[in-house]
Image (tube, grey):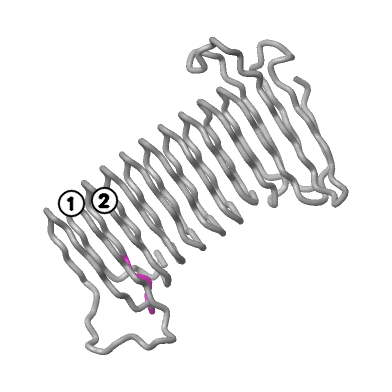
C-alpha cells in the first residue's frame, strides 16, 4: 500500500491487528506516518483513520485472517510507524515482533510469538505472550508482563511492576511502587528496589535484590533448598515512620537469595 501521512496536533491512538508482522515504531512530531509492505493482496490490509472532535487522531490497521491458513507459514508484514511521543499504541498479533525507538506514550501488546523491545514509554506497558523476550529501557508508569516462556528485562520502572513468566529470567535495573515477580524456572535480579513493596516468588532460581540508598526495609525471606545472605547494615533501631520503606518478601523452593545495598548508579 502507499505510504500514509496524517497531521496530528493532539492525542494519537493507534491499533494494529495483524497475524504475522514486524512492527517498527519511531518518534515523529505533529504527524503520523504509516508504511506497510509485504501484503500479497491489496485487500489483505485495511487502514481506517478518523479524528475526534477534541483532535484525537485514531488509526486502525487490520489484516484479514483467513480461516485454514497456518499463520506460522505465512509471509509477514513490515509495518513502519512514525508517531508523536504521546501516542497510545495497541497491538494484537499472532507472531509479531515490536521495536519502538524514541519515546511513546503507552504500549499494550498481545501476541503468541514475538519479541518486544521498547526504548522510552511515558505511561504504562502491558505485554502478554506465549513465547518471546521483553526488553523495556524506561517505563514512566507501570509494567505488566505475562509470558509462558521468555526473558524480561527492564531498566527503570517508575510505578511498580507485575511480572510473570513460567520459564525465563527477570532482570530489573530500578523499580519503585507496588511490585510482584513470579517465575516457575528462572533467576530474578533487581538491582535497586525503592520505596513500596516487592514480592518475589520463584520455584527454581536464584533471587538477588538491591535496596535503594536511603530506603529502610522489612524482610520476609524463605527458601526450602538454598542459602540466604544479606549484606544490609544492621542499625539496631527502627526506621522512622516518615522515612521511605520497602516491604520485601522473597519465597523460593530451590535457589539462593541475596539481599544487598544497591549501588548509587543503579538507583
153 versus 147 height, above or below: below
Which structural element holds mark 1? strand
Could you tell me residue 177's position as x and y percent? 46, 66
Question: What quarter of the picture does the N terminus occupy?
Answer: top right
Distance, label 1 to label 2, CA atoms, is 7 Å
| Residue bounds of the magenta highlight | 210-214
Farthest residue to the right: give it: 53
Which structural element holds mark 2? strand
Question: What quarter of the picture does the C terminus occupy?
Answer: bottom left
Q: Going 48% across and 50% down the picture, which residue do you hit?
A: 144
> Which label number is shown at residue 253?
1
* Horizontal side, residue 17 vs residue 181: left or right: right
> Which label number is shown at residue 202?
2
Could you tell me residue 11's position as x and y percent? 76, 50
100 versus 200 height, above or below: above
Q: Is residue 97 magenta?
A: no
Q: Answer yes or no: do the residues labelled 1 and 2 have beta carbons within 8 Å?
A: yes
Q: Most prominent secondary structure in the magenta stretch?
A: loop
Q: Is residue 192 visible?
A: no
Number of numbered markers: 2
Q: Does the magenta stretch include residue 213?
A: yes
Q: Residues within 10 Å of mark 2 (few under 14, many from 20)?
A: many
Q: Going 16% across and 63% down the picture, which residue do you hit?
A: 228
Q: Going 55% across and 23% down the picture, which residue do you hit?
A: 20
Could you tell me residue 126's position as x and y percent? 53, 46
Q: How crowded is mark 1: few (under 14 residues within 10 Å), some or many (20 or more)?
A: some
Q: Quadrant of residue 240?
A: bottom left
Amino acid at each position: 500500500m502507499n505510504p500514509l501521512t496524517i497531521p496530528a496536533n493532539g492525542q494519537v491512538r493507534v491499533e494494529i491487528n495483524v497475524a504475522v508482522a514486524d512492527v517498527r515504531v519511531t518518534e515523529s512530531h505533529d504527524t503520523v506516518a504509516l508504511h506497510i509492505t509485504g501484503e500479497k493482496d491489496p485487500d489483505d490490509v485495511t487502514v481506517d483513520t478518523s479524528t475526534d472532535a477534541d483532535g484525537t487522531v485514531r488509526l486502525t490497521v487490520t489484516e484479514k485472517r483467513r480461516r485454514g491458513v497456518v499463520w506460522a507459514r505465512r509471509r509477514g508484514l513490515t509495518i513502519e510507524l512514525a508517531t508523536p511521543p504521546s501516542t497510545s499504541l495497541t497491538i494484537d498479533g499472532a507472531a509479531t515482533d515490536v521495536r519502538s525507538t524514541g519515546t511513546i506514550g503507552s504500549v499494550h501488546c498481545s501476541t503468541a510469538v514475538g519479541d518486544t523491545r521498547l526504548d522510552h514509554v511515558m505511561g504504562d506497558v502491558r505485554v502478554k505472550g506465549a513465547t518471546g523476550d521483553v526488553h523495556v529501557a524506561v517505563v514512566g508508569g507501570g509494567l505488566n508482563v505475562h509470558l509462558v516462556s521468555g526473558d524480561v528485562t527492564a531498566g527503570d520502572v517508575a510505578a511498580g511492576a507485575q511480572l510473570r513468566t513460567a520459564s525465563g529470567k527477570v532482570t530489573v535495573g530500578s523499580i519503585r511502587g507496588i511490585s510482584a515477580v513470579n517465575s516457575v524456572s528462572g533467576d530474578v535480579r533487581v538491582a535497586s528496589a525503592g520505596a513500596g513493596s516487592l514480592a518475589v516468588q520463584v520455584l527454581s532460581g536464584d533471587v538477588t535484590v538491591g535496596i535503594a540508598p536511603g530506603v529502610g526495609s522489612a524482610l520476609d525471606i524463605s527458601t526450602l533448598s538454598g542459602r540466604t545472605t544479606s549484606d544490609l547494615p544492621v542499625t539496631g533501631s527502627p526506621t522512622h515512620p516518615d522515612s521511605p520503606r520497602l516491604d520485601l518478601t522473597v519465597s523460593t523452593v530451590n535457589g539462593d537469595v541475596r539481599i544487598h545495598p544497591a549501588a548509587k548508579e543503579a538507583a
